[in-house]
Image: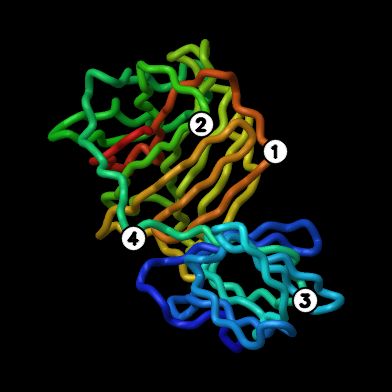
């Protein structure tokens, strides 16, 4: 696919695409995509560095684009490409220009949030839910040691502090070994007032899961941990020899999830309550999920 962008900087560039059918895709552009090539009837051929761009609105019928720059300037012309290549949470995709209504450039900073070791005094250790009918092994309580928490099977760690949106949660998580047919790590937003000894029902959350058959996935979870949306990115296999960096941005009606360089969002959500706890969950009982670093901001 011909490049719409040319090399300009080494920083990653994220694009948010609004499609003509109402869909939205967020992903990281190919490393060579760094300048928008535009043919303008009044200005001729232009090469606009991507860090100068704010948005591009495309009239698919006329094949004409209106480019808005960071300083508010606008220019019209024809984008010199057939489409865009992105890496998203559900894999690599090639999006034809004909189905793109608007794109917004979201430059990604080269700096990252410095995560901190976990302090056991900031967390409550929850028992296995008393209302669960699970007949098997119920795991062990979360283990805090050397600045990390180890989740050992449906006995969660919940923050003592209440939080509210907007909020970003960021952590590292590593599965020690794939011990069962399936397993999962979850970050749950648990409504204020939910009891500690019962399975929380009023929640939103995300999960990173593995399956023995290779169906590893990233998911958004709703009330009663109901699956809202599941992604199985091509080639995604949850490895045990490295930590994954998980970043969850929480807004009143939107969750934005990033796992390493995979990113996806979901909108039109309702938080369980105005204030909520953060709860870390790991499953199966034989799995050990390590969370060595954590931050909220």
Tell me where residue 101 sits by quadrant: bottom right
Question: Mark number for residue 64?
Answer: 3
Determine the residue located farthest toward the front in the rendered image.
42
Q: Nearer the viewer, mark 3 or mark 4?
A: 3
Q: CA distance from mark 2 to mark 1?
A: 15 Å
Q: Nearer the viewer, mark 2 or mark 3?
A: 3
Colouring of the image: rainbow
Q: Residue 97 location, x and y as percent?
A: 71, 76
Q: CA distance from mark 1 to mark 3?
A: 31 Å
Residue 132 lies left or right of residue 171; in this view the side is right
Q: Residue 11 location, x and y as percent?
A: 37, 67
Q: Residue 153 location, x and y as percent?
A: 36, 34
Q: Say what secondary structure mark 2 lies in.
A: loop
Question: Mark number for residue 268?
Answer: 1
Q: CA distance from mark 2 to mark 4?
A: 31 Å
Residue that numbered label 4 is attached to: 239
Q: CA distance from mark 2 to mark 3?
A: 36 Å
Residue 229 lies left or right of residue 262; in this view the side is right
Residue that numbered label 2 is attached to: 166
Tell me where residue 240 sits by quadrant: bottom left
- At label 1, counting other C-alpha atoms closer than 10 Å, the crowd grade (few under 14, some 14-19, many 20 or more) is few
Q: Say what secondary structure mark 4 lies in.
A: loop
Q: Is residue 280 visible?
A: yes
- The earlier-in-sequence mark between 1 and 3 is 3
**Residue occupying the point 28% across, 28% down:** 142
Q: CA distance from mark 3 to mark 4?
A: 44 Å
Q: Is residue 82 visible?
A: no
């Amino acid at each position: 696919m011909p490049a719409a962008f040319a090399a300009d900087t080494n920083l990653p560039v994220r694009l948010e695409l609004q499609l003509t059918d109402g869909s939205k895709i967020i992903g990281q552009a190919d490393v060579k995509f760094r300048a928008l090539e535009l043919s303008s009837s009044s200005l001729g051929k232009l090469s606009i560095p991507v860090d100068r761009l704010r948005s591009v609105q495309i009239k698919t019928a006329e094949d004409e684009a209106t480019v808005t720059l960071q300083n508010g300037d606008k220019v019209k012309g024809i984008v010199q490409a057939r489409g865009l290549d992105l890496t998203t949470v559900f894999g690599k995709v090639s999006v034809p220009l004909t189905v793109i209504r608007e794109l917004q450039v979201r430059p990604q900073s080269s700096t990252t949030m410095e995560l901190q070791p976990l302090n056991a005094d900031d967390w409550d250790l929850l028992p296995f839910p008393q209302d669960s009918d699970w007949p098997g092994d119920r795991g062990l309580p979360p283990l805090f040691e050397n600045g990390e928490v180890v989740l050992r099977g449906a006995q969660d760690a919940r923050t003592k502090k209440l939080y509210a949106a907007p909020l970003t949660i960021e952590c590292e998580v590593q599965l020690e070994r794939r011990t069962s047919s399936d397993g999962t790590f979850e970050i749950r937003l648990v409504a204020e007032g939910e009891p500690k000894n019962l399975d929380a029902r009023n929640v939103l959350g995300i999960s990173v899961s593995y399956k023995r058959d290779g169906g590893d996935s990233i998911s958004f979870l709703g009330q009663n941990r109901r699956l809202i949306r599941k992604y199985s990115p091509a080639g995604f296999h949850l490895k045990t020899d490295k930590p994954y960096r998980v970043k969850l941005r929480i807004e009143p009606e939107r969750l934005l999830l990033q796992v390493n360089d995979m990113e996806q969002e979901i909108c039109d959500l309702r938080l369980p309550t105005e204030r909520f706890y953060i709860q870390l969950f790991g499953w199966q009982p034989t799995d050990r999920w390590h969370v060595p670093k954590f931050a909220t901001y």
